[in-house]
């Protein structure tokens, strides 16, 4: 890959193309593009490395990184709630970098589409969407890597999703890192598929096309009111110390309820649906065909019933 590789993203809200400012791009290029880095790859992708790094983001010292991070990535911090140090200005209100990382929006900053036929964005992220999972998919990874059976890790469960729609929501370290339910319903089954913790950055995907099925991931099979059965897959990544389920999965959920969150690191949520039940938004499908992700705010429309 050339040093000039850029990640182009279409920002739906601003209605314009943007160049993504990548956090840690030098490290990603070293780990996946440099011969020495590739030798160290198994260490960097190990759970132990990510857990140790994640723990370092829990230290009080790590809080010193918050203010420069906000400035460097131009984060509109006033949209978010303060951290535990309530008496401080918001930039210094977080006890650690991880507390800042899992910050919550202020009440009313995001609303979920109220229409039953519209699926709400389950993460504030960069989305790829496909109307049907098939072996000739080439974006963002080789088609065989996007088969439901590979992502879900259970051939019997995967049968319901073969040929169905698929969305991939990629979260960057700069993003809101909580993820939500796209519709009301109940959890049928939930389990973890063991694996590595490679970076899910497009720079890394250029070098390794099997990351989504090699990485550790947590799968929830959801029965929803308006979109049928969904496979909701949270994919771990380098330096994600933990995937946390904050919702009691034994209870029914409503559209917009928080499902969980990722601790430090870029992360991904993949959503698989049943054939013919729904389709991703037209702009997402069009941009995906051009190899471009669509940046969509939490709660905005990402799909409609067929």
Image: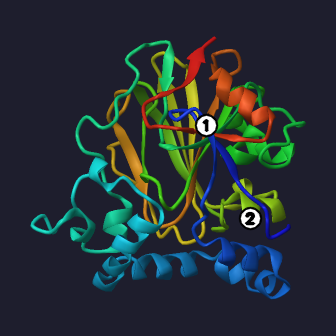
Q: Residue 144: x, y in percent? A: 85, 45
Using residue 193 as the reference point, say whether residue 191 is left or right of it: left
Q: Residues within 10 Å of mark 1 (few under 14, many from 20)?
A: few
Question: Residue farthest to the left?
Answer: 87
- Asked whether, in this view, residue 124 is left or right of residue 235, the answer is left
Q: Reply above or below: 243 against 85.
A: above
Residue 183 visible to an observer of this rendering: yes
Quadrant in the rendering for residue 48: bottom right
- Does residue 129 appear left or right of residue 178 in this picture? right
User: Which residue in the protein does label 2 denote?
Assistant: 204
The residue drawn where x is 47% and y is 37% is 297
Residues under numbered marks 1 and 2 in contact, where contact means CB atoms less than 8 Å apart: no
N-terminal of the two: label 1 or label 2? 1
- In depth, the one of 199 and 86 nearer the eye is 86
Q: Which mark is residue 16?
A: 1
User: Dividing the picture into quarters, in which one does residue 143 lie?
Assistant: top right
Q: Is residue 153 visible?
A: no
């Amino acid at each position: 890959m050339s040093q000039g590789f850029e990640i182009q993203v279409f920002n739906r809200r601003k209605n314009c193309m943007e160049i993504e400012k990548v956090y840690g791009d030098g490290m990603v290029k070293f780990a996946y593009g440099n011969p020495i880095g590739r030798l160290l790859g198994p260490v960097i992708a190990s759970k132990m490395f990510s857990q140790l790094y994640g723990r370092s983001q829990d230290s009080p010292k790590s809080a010193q990184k918050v203010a420069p991070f906000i400035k460097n990535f131009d984060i509109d911090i006033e949209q978010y709630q303060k951290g535990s140090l309530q008496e401080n200005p918001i930039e210094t209100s977080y006890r650690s970098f991880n507390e800042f990382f899992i910050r919550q929006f202020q009440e009313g900053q995001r609303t979920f589409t109220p229409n039953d036929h519209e699926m709400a964005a389950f993460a504030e992220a960069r989305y790829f969407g496909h109307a049907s999972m098939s072996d000739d998919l080439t974006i963002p990874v080789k088609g065989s890597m996007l088969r439901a059976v590979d992502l879900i890790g259970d051939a019997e469960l995967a049968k319901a999703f073969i040929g169905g729609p698929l969305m991939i929501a990629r979260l960057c370290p700069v993003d809101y890192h909580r993820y939500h339910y796209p519709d009301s319903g109940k959890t049928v089954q939930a389990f973890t598929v063991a694996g590595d913790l490679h970076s899910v950055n497009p720079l890394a995907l250029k070098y390794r096309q099997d990351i989504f099925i090699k990485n550790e991931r947590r799968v929830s099979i959801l029965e929803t009111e308006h979109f049928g059965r969904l496979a909701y897959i949270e994919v771990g990544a380098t330096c994600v110390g933990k995937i946390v389920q904050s919702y009691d999965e034994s209870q029914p959920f409503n559209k917009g309820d928080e499902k969980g969150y990722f601790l430090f690191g870029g992360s991904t949520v993949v959503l698989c649906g049943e054939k013919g039940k729904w389709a991703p938004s037209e702009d997402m499908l069009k941009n995906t065909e051009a190899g471009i992700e669509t940046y969509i705010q939490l709660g905005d429309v990402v799909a409609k019933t067929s």
